[in-house]
Image: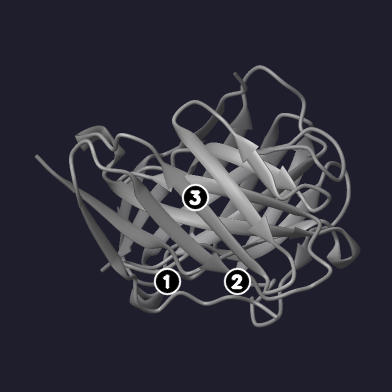
Amino acid sequence: GAVVSQHPSWVICKSGTSVKIECRSLDFQATTMFWYRQFPKQSLMLMATSNEGSKATYEQGVEKDKFLINHASLTLSTLTVTSAHPEDSSFYICSARVGGQYNEQFFGPGTRLTVL
Amino acid sequence: GESVGLHLPTLSVQEGDNSIINCAYSNSASDYFIWYKQESGKGPQFIIDIRSNMDKRQGQRVTVLLNKTVKHLSLQIAATQPGDSAVYFCAENIFENGNKLVFGAGTILRVKS
């Protein structure tokens, strides 16, 4: 099956620093990648949709200058949390989709971000 | 609209019993639905999907039922096992909304041995 990896799996950083999270599709090319955030005991909330070579589309309420997304290739998307604060501590999950309407999204294992 | 999960209901079942997890979705334009299983500290894992032109689909030990009239989706797990313990999410895909998934609130399934 299709595999999506994330790196790092967890990160602890000081308030004010920036953190980059990588999402890779290992055995397929993803036309679209998605970034989600999940707080404890809550559901996944879509942050943004990114297509290779174009700007990401952010969901309402998500600050694009704070959560920088780069989708440089069909197998790699990165999410950078800039000037992280404790309220940004969360579980960040990416997913990748090959094609259109009924194509399954394959999810990564998630990255636990803790901002001190 | 977006579904926001603030409280996760819990379903406790005895090992070997059947489980039924329910989900109410929000948008009548949703055309594709997926059930995911999420274990603690991991990403969601695909279980089964169903398109809006179907009302039932069966997999191995799992069945998904779709009732578009009342916008309701259910996941049935036969002969529930301890390894089924996890959080289960339904997700709806809205093609006209940029083909994005919107996740439901989630249900915790606890299997008692």
Nearest to N terminus: mark 1 or mark 2: 2
Could you tell me the amino acid type at mark 2? Lys
Badge 1 and badge 2 both on one subunit: yes
Q: Secondary structure at mark 3?
A: strand
Q: Which residue is mark 2?
A: A66
- Considering the numbered disc 1 on the image, is that residue within a helix, a strand or a loop? helix
Secondary structure of the residue carrying numbered label 2: loop
Q: Position of residue B23 (x, y in %)?
A: 52, 65
Mark 3: which amino acid?
Answer: Leu
Camera-side mark, 1 or 3: 3
Residue at the spot 74% in from the left edge and 66% down from the top edge:
B68
Q: On what subunit does the disc labeled 1 rest?
A: A
Q: Nearer the viewer, residue B30 or B95?
A: B30
- Mark 1, residue position: A88
User: Horizontal and vertical percent for residue B46?
Assistant: 54, 38
A62 over B11 or under it: above or below: below
For the residues labelled 1 and 2, say whether their Cβ atoms are less than 8 Å apart. yes
